[in-house]
Structure formats: C-alpha cells, structure tokens
Amino acid sequence: METLRERKKQRTRDALLRAALELFTTRGYEATTVDDIVAAVDVSQRTFFRYFAGKEDAALAVREMSEARFVEAVRARPPHEAPMQALRQAVIEGWDGLSEAVSAVVPVELYLRMYRVIESTPALLAAHLRRSMEAEEKIARILAEREGVDVDTDPRPRLVVALFAGVIRVTERQWGTAAGELDVAAIRELTARYLDQVGPALAEDWRTR
Amino acid sequence: METLRERKKQRTRDALLRAALELFTTRGYEATTVDDIVAAVDVSQRTFFRYFAGKEDAALAVREMSEARFVEAVRARPPHEAPMQALRQAVIEGWDGLSEAVSAVVPVELYLRMYRVIESTPALLAAHLRRSMEAEEKIARILAEREGVDVDTDPRPRLVVALFAGVIRVTERQWGTAAGELDVAAIRELTARYLDQVGPALAEDWRTR
DNA sequence: GAGGCTAGTGACAGCTACTGACAATTGACA
DNA sequence: TGTCAATTGTCAGTAGCTGTCACTAGCCTC
C-alpha cells in the first residue's frame, strides 16, 4: 500500500465489494443490479467493471480467496502425508486462520452469509463449480509432483482430488441447507465427519452396518 | 406425434436445436448469437425463447437427454447390486443405446462434437456442472431408497454419488481433451478404466505401487 | 514547484441475452 | 364454415457488459 493512488484504488474496490455483498445477501443476487451497487458507492458503472469482470466475479471474490488459501495449504503439507491425508489436513486446518484473512476485507459474518447465497443462486453455484474445477486441476498437479507421478498418464491425482472435492461439495451443501450454525467450527466438524464416511459409502453393502 | 400441430412444433424445435448445435460446433458458442440461430431456421427470436429457456439451454439439451437416461438406468438396476456397482453398470451400459436415442434428433457425430464445445466453453461448463448436481441429488435419493436409508440423516447416498460423479467428470475431461477417438466405445472403455482406479487413488501410498 | 505523463474515472453509445404485452395467424373441432 | 385455442410475430423495454474518448488527479522529472 505505497502510493496514494494505490490506496485509493484499494478503497474503491473494497467499497464496491462490500456494497455488492451487502446487497446480495439482503436483497438477493438476481434482484441486485450493477446500478444498485455503483449507486451505493457513488461511482460510475464503468468503474465497477474495471474492478470486477462481472457481477458474478464480485459475488465469488471471497470464495476465490479461500480457495487460493486452500491450494497453498495443500502445497505446504509435509511430504510424508498420503494424498488424501494431506487434503484432509489442509481443509480442516484451513478453516482456522481464514477468519482473520477475510475480515481484512469484509466482516466474517457477511462472508458466511454470502456462502449461502451462492449455494442457493443457480447462476452463482454454476460459476462457483466451474472455478472449483480449476482449483482442482491445480491441486492435482501439486499432488502429482509430491508423489512423483505424471498427471497426464496417471489418473490418480485428478481422481483423488475429484473424490475429495465431491465430499467437500456435499459437506458445504449440507451446511448451507441446514438452518443453524453460521460459524466456522460447525463446518469444520462436519467436514471431518463426512470425510470419515468415504470408506463406508464405498462399502459393498450398506444394509449390514 | 398425433396432430399436425404437435408435429409442426416438434419440427420447429428440432430445427432450432440442430441449427444451434451446428453453429455452436463450427463457429463457437459465444460467437453465435440467438439471431444467427433463428435466421438459419427463419423464425422470430421470440419463438426460440419459447422452446428454450436460453441459449445455454439449447446447448445443453443433448446432455440433458443422456443424463435423464442415466438416472432411469440407475433406477432400473437390480436391487442386489451394491450402490457403486449399480452406478457403474448404469453408466457403462448406458452408452449403448444412447446413439439410437440421440440420432432421432441430431446426428451422433454432432452430439459428440458438442460435448467438446461444452467442455471448452466456460459458461457452458459451469451450467453443465450445476445441472449435474441436480441429477446427482436425484440419484442419491434413488440409492437411498434402494438401500433403505434416509438421505437426510445418512450422508452415504450423496457421498457415493458425488464420488462417482467426480470420476465421470475426470473421465469426460480426459476424453474431451485427448485429441482422437470421437466414438462411444472409447469413452466407455475409459470410464471403466478410471472407475477401477478409485481404490488405488485412495490408497495410502502411491509410491510403492 | 511547474509542467508533462499516465492511471483512473465518468459519460455516452452500442451490443446481446432475455422478457412482457398484445396482435396476428393457423390448426382443431363442432 | 365459423369459432376457439394454441402458436407465432412484432414491438418495446431491461440488464449485463464493452468500446471510446475526454477529463481529472496523483506522480515524476527537471
């Protein structure tokens, strides 16, 4: 944050993002127009599109941040951990520390509310899933390198990431649908519980449990 | 196909779909406007939107069809099969018979080319992934009923479907990226091979294989 | 510390996807 | 054949997004 120019830019972006999330979470995503957002910050529409590729991009900015954190967390796992284990540790521990990183930009509570808006808005959910795929690809490459296999000939890196991502999606959906618990501890615990169910889910016969 | 009215309707829809896919696969999805499509069929733009919810909807119509087939295939699996086994059989056998079902509307080759357009067009991929999630939910409920468990308290149905869907996505992506083999046999074989890699991918240590 | 340079912004015009309202047409059926 | 209803076209409008161009305010050099 050196020059005055950069500080001003950052302030404009933060103001836009915050106003956008505030409107999305109260009024709804579709019901909020870009004009509403820029009116709240008192800048031109053109300016909004200089900071965000689109309405969608603003809505997903916070998740983008936590996904980037997750990717780095995986990269930082000690090499002796098995792939699935590394992913598990990265996501569980990633929830800690996220609060501080997020609250530098927007209130954590707004962030968590936005999570649910994404989950319940088809257009946003779609965009989110696609971006997640890109993150999956990155992680697959990290795992492949850790384990010394070739990501283009060995399907295992992409597979284990896809399986893991599946669990995360189910977890998030469950957390987003269930009425209560808008805090980080709840989702972390749910994640651990669901990851433990992967084995049972793949088991031959569920009925004899 | 009783009355003349219904036949005309069907013909209009088929013509629109076919023109759309033809344009999407040659010129690209983004580069094709709705006006281009309706010009090719010589109907008004309004008519297009009466048959398809949007441009996207037309692009995904064929996949919609094969997904619906898959859901029914799962429902029809014999009850003694384990969940993962039922899913596997449904997808493998589902590829047979698909050709005939599709070619009633559009040429199979056009259908397969469209697959790749979806994979390589961000907006379409996003929409496709979201729709897949809806299909996953349906299948999870089918499995839950088969196995006699409650889908809202037992995470296993949704988990096994999410895991399976992950494998399918990786498979499709691989098939779509690899240069050759635009036929059904290739993707069926790849699916089987990747499903066999689920165990190895979850294994503790890849390096000692 | 004056003046040129440039990043950031606003104003405006334009394109495309999509929707609502109403009129015109065309098949169905008595 | 005439009436009704389903289908389609026309027109006007909204929203997301982009290109252009002129202007202002921070920055940097002499």
Image (cartoon, coloured by chain):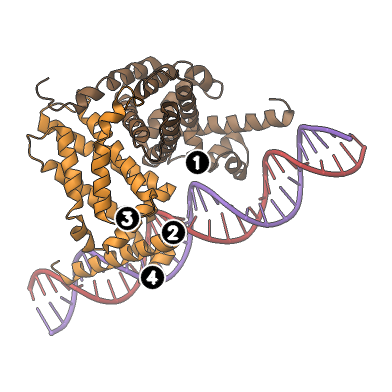
Chain colours: A orange, B brown, C purple, D red
| Circle 3 crowding by C-alpha within 10 Å: few under 14, some 14–19, many from 20 | few
Nearer to the camera, A192 or A153: A192
In the rendered structure, are the residues bearing label 1 and label 3 in contact, judged by CB atoms less than 8 Å apart? Answer: no
Q: Which residue is labeled 1 in the image?
A: B55
Q: Name the amino acid type tagged 1.
A: Lys
Residue A209 image position (x, y, % from top left): 31, 28
User: Which picture quadrant has residue A54?
Assistant: bottom left
In the rendered structure, are the residues bearing label 1 and label 4 in contact, judged by CB atoms less than 8 Å apart? Answer: no
Measure how far apart labels 1 and 4 are at the Cα level: 32 Å
- The answer to whether A179 appears left or right of A64 in the picture is right
Mark in front: 3 vs 4: 3
Q: Which residue is labeled 4 in the image?
A: A40
Output the chain of dot 2.
A
| Circle 2 crowding by C-alpha within 10 Å: few under 14, some 14–19, many from 20 | some
SS under mark 2: loop
Residue A201 image position (x, y, % from top left): 31, 30
SS under mark 4: helix
Q: Which residue is labeled 2 in the image?
A: A28
Output the chain of dot 4.
A
- Earlier along the polypeptide chain: callout 4 or callout 2? 2
Nearer to the camera, A164 or A27: A164
Q: Which residue is labeled 3 in the image?
A: A181
Measure how far apart labels 4 and 2 are at the Cα level: 15 Å
Measure how far apart labels 2 and 3 are at the Cα level: 21 Å
Q: Name the amino acid type tagged 3.
A: Glu
